[in-house]
Image: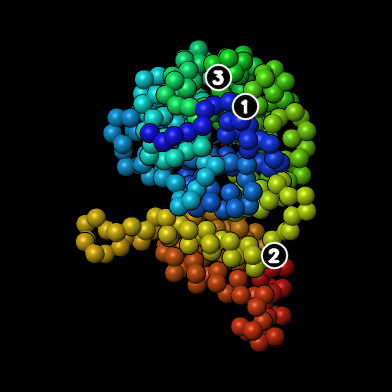
C-alpha cells in the first residue's frame, strides 16, 4: 500500500481549500480522465472521478471499475468516488482504490438516484443515514486518506442537516451537498439556502453543488458560507470556468482557443482510450469519439453550423478535420488575408 500522510488539519481537502477556486463534480459519462485533465489545468481545486462500484472493485476488479479509476499520467488532486452499502466491501474497495488508482482522497456517493445504484447505496443511503455513518467509519478505518461524502438534501424531503451532522461526527473530511432531494432528480432549481444552512450547522467544510453555469453565479453562491462550490454541467465544454474562479483577472478564451481545446479534449480521449487490440495481436483498437458527441458542441456555442457534424464524429480524424481549420484562424500565415477576414465573422460571430 502507498505511504500516505495522516489525515489531519493538513489533509488533502484542507490544503486544497486554502486557495480560491471551484471543484469539478463527479459525473458518470463525463468526468473521465480527459475532462479531469482539462479542468485541473485550468485551476480546479480538485476533480472527482465518475462513481465506481465498491463491489466491482472489491470482488472482481471488473474491467469497467478499473477503467473508471485509472488516472491519466501525472494526475494528482483527483478524488475517487465509490458507491456501495456494505461496510466490509467499502473498506476493501477503499484499499484497492488506494493501491490501484493513487487517489488524493475517497468520496462516498450518497446522491445517485439511478436504479443501477439504488439498493446498492447512492441516494438510498439518505433513507438510512445511520448506515452511511457506519460506511464512513469503515472507510476511514481502511485508509489514512481523507474520506468525504456527497449527499443530496434528502430522499424525498430535506433531512440534510441531520445527515450532515452524522457524517461530520463519523469523520467525513468534507461534505458536498447537491441542493435537491433524490425525488427531484434534476428538476427544479438547486436550493442554495438549504445548502447554506447545512454549511452553518457543521464544523466540516461543506461544498455546494447545483446549477452553477458562470463564474459570477459561482462567486454569488460562494458568499453563502460554503467552503467552495462544485461545478458539473456548467463545466462541460467550458473548463475555463475554473480559471475564472482561481485567478483574479483570467483571460477569456478566444474562439480559436475554444476550438483548440475541443480538439485537445478529443486528442486526450484518443490517447487515453486507444489500446492494443486484445483479439488482433499487433494491432491497435482506437478510441471511439462517440462519447464526445455530447461534449464537443458545448465548446463551440458560436458555431451552430458545425454542431450537426460534431454530433456524428466517429474517429479522431473526423474531429481533426472539423476543428483544425478553426484553430488556425488566428494564424494568417496559413491563409490569405481575404480568406481569414471573411471566414472569421462567419464562424465566430
Ligand atoms: C450526467 C451526470 C452524471 C452524474 N454522475 C454523478 C456521479 O457519478 N456521482 C455523483 O455524486 N454525482 C453525480 N452527478 C451529480 C453532479 O455531481 C452534480 O451534483 C449535479 O449535476 C448538480 O450540479 P451541476 O448543476 O453543476 O451539474 C451527475 C450529474 C450528471 C448531470
In front: label 2 or label 1: 1
Vertical comparison of 345 with 21: above or below: below
Which of discs 3 and 1 lies nearer the camera? The answer is 1
Q: Is residue 241 visible?
A: no
Query: Which of the marked residues, 3 or 2, is nearer the chain's N terminus?
Result: 3
Q: Is residue 126 above or below residue 14?
A: above
**Comes first in the chain, label 3 or label 1:** 1
Q: Nearer the viewer, residue 183 or 64?
A: 64
Q: Residue at x 62, y 26 (%)?
A: 9
Tell me the residue that label 1 is attached to: 9
Please state which of residues 159 and 90 is positioned toward the viewer in this rendering: 90
Q: Is mark 3 within 8 Å of ligand 1?
A: no
Q: Residue at x 61, y 83 (%)?
A: 334
Instruction: Identify the residue under disc 2.
Output: 254
Q: Which mark is residue 171?
A: 3
Disc 2 and disc 1 in contact, CB within 8 angstroms: no
Q: Is residue 252 above or below residue 110?
A: below
Amino acid at each position: 500500500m502507498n505511504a500516505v500522510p495522516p489525515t489531519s488539519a493538513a489533509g488533502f481537502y484542507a490544503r486544497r481549500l486554502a486557495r480560491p477556486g471551484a471543484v469539478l463534480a463527479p459525473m458518470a459519462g463525463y468526468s473521465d480522465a480527459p475532462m479531469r485533465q482539462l479542468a485541473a489545468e485550468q485551476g480546479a481545486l480538485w476533480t472527482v472521478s465518475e462513481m465506481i462500484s465498491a463491489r466491482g472493485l472489491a470482488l472482481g476488479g471488473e474491467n469497467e471499475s478499473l477503467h473508471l479509476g485509472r488516472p491519466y499520467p501525472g494526475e494528482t488532486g483527483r478524488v475517487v468516488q465509490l458507491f456501495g452499502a456494505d461496510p466490509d466491501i467499502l473498506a476493501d474497495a477503499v484499499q484497492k482504490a488506494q493501491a490501484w488508482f493513487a487517489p488524493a482522497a475517497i468520496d462516498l456517493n450518497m446522491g445517485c438516484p439511478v436504479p443501477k445504484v439504488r439498493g446498492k447505496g447512492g441516494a438510498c443511503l439518505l433513507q438510512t443515514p445511520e448506515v452511511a455513518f457506519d460506511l464512513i467509519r469503515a472507510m476511514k478505518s481502511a485508509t489514512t486518506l481523507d474520506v468525504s461524502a456527497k449527499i443530496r438534501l434528502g430522499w424525498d424531503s430535506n433531512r440534510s442537516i441531520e445527515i450532515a451532522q452524522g457524517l461530520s461526527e463519523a469523520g467525513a473530511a468534507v461534505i458536498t451537498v447537491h441542493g435537491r432531494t433524490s425525488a427531484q432528480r434534476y428538476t427544479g432549481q438547486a436550493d442554495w439556502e438549504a445548502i447554506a444552512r447545512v454549511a452553518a450547522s457543521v464544523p466540516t467544510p461543506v461544498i455546494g453543488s447545483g446549477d452553477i453555469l458562470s463564474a459570477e453565479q459561482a462567486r454569488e453562491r460562494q458568499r453563502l458560507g460554503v467552503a467552495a462550490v462544485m461545478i458539473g454541467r456548467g463545466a462541460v465544454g467550458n473548463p475555463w470556468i475554473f480559471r475564472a474562479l482561481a485567478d483574479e483577472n483570467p483571460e477569456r478564451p478566444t474562439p480559436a482557443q475554444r476550438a483548440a481545446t475541443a480538439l485537445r479534449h478529443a486528442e486526450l480521449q484518443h490517447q487515453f482510450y486507444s489500446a492494443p487490440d486484445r483479439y488482433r495481436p499487433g494491432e491497435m483498437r482506437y478510441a471511439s469519439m462517440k462519447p464526445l458527441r455530447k461534449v464537443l458542441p458545448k465548446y463551440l456555442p458560436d458555431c451552430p453550423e458545425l454542431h450537426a457534424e460534431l454530433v456524428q464524429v466517429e474517429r479522431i480524424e473526423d474531429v481533426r478535420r472539423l476543428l483544425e481549420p478553426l484553430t488556425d484562424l488566428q494564424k494568417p500565415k496559413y491563409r490569405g488575408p481575404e480568406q481569414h477576414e471573411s471566414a472569421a465573422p462567419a464562424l465566430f460571430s
